[in-house]
Image: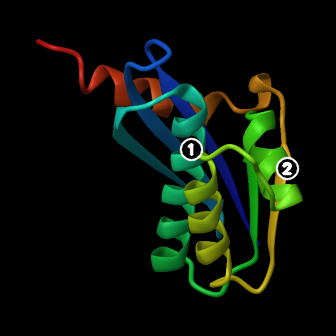
Amino acid sequence: MIEVYTDGASNSNLGISGAGIFIKAAGKNYEYTFPLDVISNHEAEFHAVIKALEICKETFPNEIVSLRSDSQVVVDVVEKDFTKNKTFLPLLEKIREETQYFPYFFIKWIPESQNKNADLLARKALQMQRPK
């Protein structure tokens, strides 16, 4: 089983955004940082989960994935497998598609204090986009 921590960050409600992914697998830690488009913080959180699943599909195929996020919105939408939000719906559909590659997929909400590594990586993605 691999542990995956994700976080999204945005410098304002619709400003530059980033995703951070921290993975614990086979006694090693893996860190990923992704600058994102101009999207909301909630959207950045969904994109972080999608990026994490894409990485796991390529790097850790057929593993059990235990994903943790400090976004209650993302966790609720994925757990319930439902949203009325037209912006979140295509993101949920992409998550559904990506989770099919794993024998088991779990998602769990964690407090921000337990998600510091992913948070730092998401903030790093913001810094990568700041004008020099």
Position of residue 108 measured from the top left corner of the image (x, y, whole percent): 85, 50
**In the rendered image, the vertical position of residue 131 relative to residue 121, given as above or below:** above
Q: Position of residue 54 (x, y in %)?
A: 49, 68
Residue 21 falls left or right of residue 4: left
Amino acid type at image mark 1: Thr
Mark 2 Cα-neighbour bin, 10 Å: few <14, some 14–19, many ≥20: some
Residue corresponding to mark 1: 87
Locate residue 21 relative to residue 93 in the image: left or right: left
Q: Is residue 92 above or below residue 62?
A: above
- Image disc number at residue 108: 2
Cα distance in 3D space between marks 2 and 1: 22 Å
Q: Residue at position x 45%, y 78% from top?
A: 58
Quarter of the N terminus within the rendering: bottom right
Q: In the picture provided, is 68 more to the left or to the right than 109?
A: left
Q: Position of residue 80 (x, y in %)?
A: 88, 57
| Quarter in which the C terminus is drawn | top left
User: Mark 2: which secondary structure?
Assistant: strand
Three-letter residue code for mark 2 = Lys
Mark 2 vs mark 1, foreground winner is: 1
Up-down relation of residue 54 to residue 101 (above or below): above
